[in-house]
Image (cartoon, grey):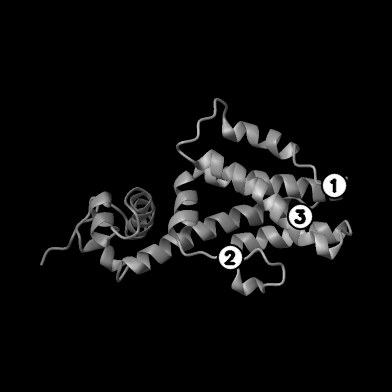
């Protein structure tokens, strides 16, 4: 039997299946998604995806994990590089919005088609929450504690700031929202408008 020749390196095919899979789910929905469709989009044989994934559920999980890991790394870098409270809040927001401006398909998949769960409750253990949100939450809560914000106000502030950042992201990533300026160039201006009282 002749060896199947693929136009992609083995690991490259895996990543391509993930990226094409995200596009397909965003266009056609989860229910109609299949390994066969992913293979067709990658221009490989119908059997090729099975060298990486046993079924579509495994590929869907890999797609979600792929986005989560990239998103987490982006936020972790912002946290590591910015230690001052005001700078951290601003850069965290810029990193969050910029990530999805660069990858709008990720935003649609993550918040519309995946099974991630974000719990806004401060008391929920980190291991039961979504990793990127944990990074955001812990950074903001740390700022709130440093500036001695009353504990009873911390959850409200956390949700308000996240709503601001996430809302900007949704607008920038939505295909049916028109804006006559460059979102990426304007993020800093928008984040400058977010001046929580606890940082003053």
In this picture, residue 34 sits left or right of residue 139: left
Which residue lies at the image location 20% right of the left edge and 60% below the top edge?
A: 46
Which residue lies at the image location 28% right of the left edge and 58% below the top edge?
A: 32
State how many labels appear. Answer: 3
In the picture of the structure, the residue carrying the numbered disc 2 is: 130
Q: In front: 80, or 61?
A: 61
How busy is the neighbourhood of tag 3: few (under 14 within 10 Å), some, or many (20 plus)?
some
In the picture of the structure, the residue carrying the numbered disc 3 is: 157
**Distance between the alpha carbons at the discs numbered 2 and 3:** 19 Å
Which residue lies at the image location 82% right of the left edge and 58% below the top edge?
A: 144
**Distance between the alpha carbons at the discs numbered 1 and 3:** 10 Å
Cβ atoms under marks 2 and 1 closer than 8 Å: no
Residue at the extreme left: 1
In this picture, residue 148 sits left or right of residue 138: right
Q: What kind of element bears circle 1? A: helix
Q: In front: 155, or 143?
A: 155
Quarter holding the N terminus is bottom left
Cβ atoms under marks 2 and 3 closer than 8 Å: no
Q: In front: 126, or 13?
A: 126
| Residue 181 picture location, percent across and down | 57, 26
In the picture of the structure, the residue carrying the numbered disc 1 is: 197
Quarter holding the C terminus is top right
Residue at the extreme top: 180
Toward which corner of the image does residue 170 lie, by quadrant? top right
How busy is the neighbourhood of tag 1: few (under 14 within 10 Å), some, or many (20 plus)?
few
In this view, 16 is above or below 2: above
Q: What kind of element bears circle 3? A: helix
Toward which corner of the image does residue 61 lie, by quadrant? bottom left
| Residue 136 picture location, percent across and down | 67, 57
């Amino acid at each position: 039997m002749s060896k199947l020749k693929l136009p992609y390196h083995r690991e490259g095919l895996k990543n391509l299946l993930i990226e094409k899979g995200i596009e397909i789910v965003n266009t056609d929905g989860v229910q109609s998604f299949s390994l066969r469709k992913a293979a067709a989009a990658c221009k490989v044989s119908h059997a090729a995806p099975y060298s990486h994934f046993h079924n579509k559920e495994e590929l869907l999980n890999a797609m979600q994990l792929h986005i989560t890991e990239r998103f987490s790394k982006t936020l972790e870098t912002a946290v590591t590089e910015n230690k001052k409270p005001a700078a951290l809040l601003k850069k965290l927001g810029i990193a969050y919005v910029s990530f999805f401006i660069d990858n709008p398909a990720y935003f649609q998949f993550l918040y519309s088609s995946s099974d991630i769960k974000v719990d806004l409750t401060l008391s929920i253990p980190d291991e039961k929450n979504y990793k990127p949100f944990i990074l955001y939450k812990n950074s903001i809560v740390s700022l709130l504690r440093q500036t001695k914000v009353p504990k009873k106000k911390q959850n409200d502030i956390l949700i308000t700031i996240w709503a601001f950042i996430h809302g900007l992201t949704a607008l920038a990533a939505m295909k049916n929202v028109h804006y006559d300026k460059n979102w990426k160039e304007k993020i800093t201006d928008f984040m400058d408008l977010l001046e929580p009282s606890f940082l003053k």
